[in-house]
Amino acid sequence: MIRTFICCFLIYSSLLAYQGQALELDYSTTIQTRWGINTRNGSTQSLNFRIQPELVFHFDNDIRLTAIARAHSDIIDKIAPGSVIRESYNPASKPLLITHKLELELRELYVETEWDNTWFTVGKQQVVWGKADGLKVLDIVNPQSFREFILEDFDDSRIPLWTVKVERSFGPIDVEFLWLPDQTYHALPESGSTFGFTSSRVVPSRPPADASVDLLLPKRPDRIIRDSDAGIRLTSFWKGWDLTFNYLYQYDNFPVLKQKLSQTTNNIAVTITQLYKRTHVIGTTLSNAFGDWVIRGEIAWFSNRHFLTRSPLSHQGVISSPELLYVVGLDWSAPYDIFASAQLFQSWVIKPKNSMNRDRLDNTLSLLLSRQFLNDTLSIELLVLGNINDGDGMIRPNIEYLYNDDLKVWLGADLFYGDSKGLFGEFKSNDRVVIGMEWVF
């Protein structure tokens, strides 16, 4: 119902704006195809095709309507659109699954307008907080599809939500207010899919060998008003520093996996429920340039996060605690058009327990190197992510060539290493080479 109401509102607003007004239309379509080849056995891991048309209507009275759709297909069952748990979607945001291998999606549909020095953006959209490379700290307003783990670009994997965004300046401070009446959460891969999680960090501990396991579907909040998310961001510039203060009241996008063990004379059964829990998020971002160097950071404090235990008998297999998550980054624009960026991610569990299935302090390092050639038409890039605690990580080299303004091709690889218990090491059998092409017209 909410989708119908908002769509009608957007159409009505656009028609109202159109009356007596000149209209400009920008239209483009992006076609992308990628072929992923497993380096261990030479098999095709993914072969997908994506077409994404975009329409932008400009009206004389400063109203703009943006509509973006997407059709996505993959011939490989274990990485196809249907290989994610779709119950985490609000029906108003869920892509239309034509077949297991083909889905159609309304990616974005929103109206932008200005009234009395206040900007309003209403509709299905993405909101980006934070700009860390590889991993997210404050970029948590929109949930994410993990169908390909974290290998997709954030713009592609981020799930747009029906949102009301209001922006206004008060002197040197810009204020952004968000209301999100869309109960959609992370789209997690199904068990047994190519990037289905097996790490003990995110999958409950194994029950007794003779036990039966009943994994219930996620119980998603569905009250439009009471279960809405809301947030505010303040942005300012002070003595060379770009600063933001962020607050978000949301349901954590990862479900809490609670386990209940029951035993009878002839059977041991484990029931796993998936619930979404509220959390307050308070954060800040900061950055400053010093010649060729840029120092930046993001900090996020979560009032309530949930972590798995080593035994399903301990606290129903999960404990709750506040978490402090932050990243410190250093960027260098080096000679010969070389760009280098290093980051340290750290996660602190404020109130740990001995039964927790991770270290209290978790450390991840990243390194990004890139260089441009041939008048910026050829670029090479290397991204390395490594978790210090588990000794696992990911290496992503990439070469991209911009044939013209409309066509680019690339060759890259996604390589994993480390123990299978780690978030990266669990996918070490999924190393692949990726060939891609993108055409915009």
Image: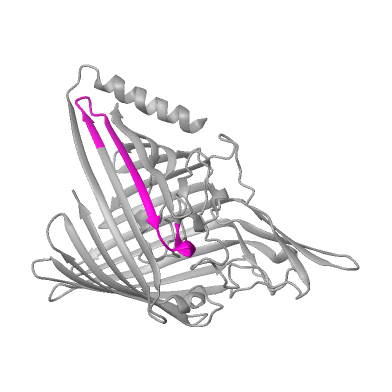
- Residue 110 percent coordinates (x, y): 35, 36
| Closer to the camera in the image, 167 or 382 | 382
From the viewer's perspective, is residue 410 above or below residue 83?
A: below
Q: Is residue 67 magenta?
A: yes
- Residue 117 percent coordinates (x, y): 28, 30
Whether residue 367 is visible here, answered yes or no, is no
From the viewer's perspective, is residue 237 above or below residue 359?
A: above
Q: Residue furthest right?
A: 265
Residue at 51 percent across and 72 percent down: it is 423
From the viewer's perspective, is residue 342 above or below residue 377?
A: below
Q: Quadrant of residue 136?
A: bottom left
Q: Quadrant of residue 286?
A: bottom left
Residue at 65 percent across and 68 percent down: it is 204
Residue at 84 percent across and 67 percent down: it is 267
| Closer to the camera in the image, 196 or 220 | 196
**Image-based side of 29 in relation to 134, left or right:** left
Residues rendered magenta in the picture: 56-80
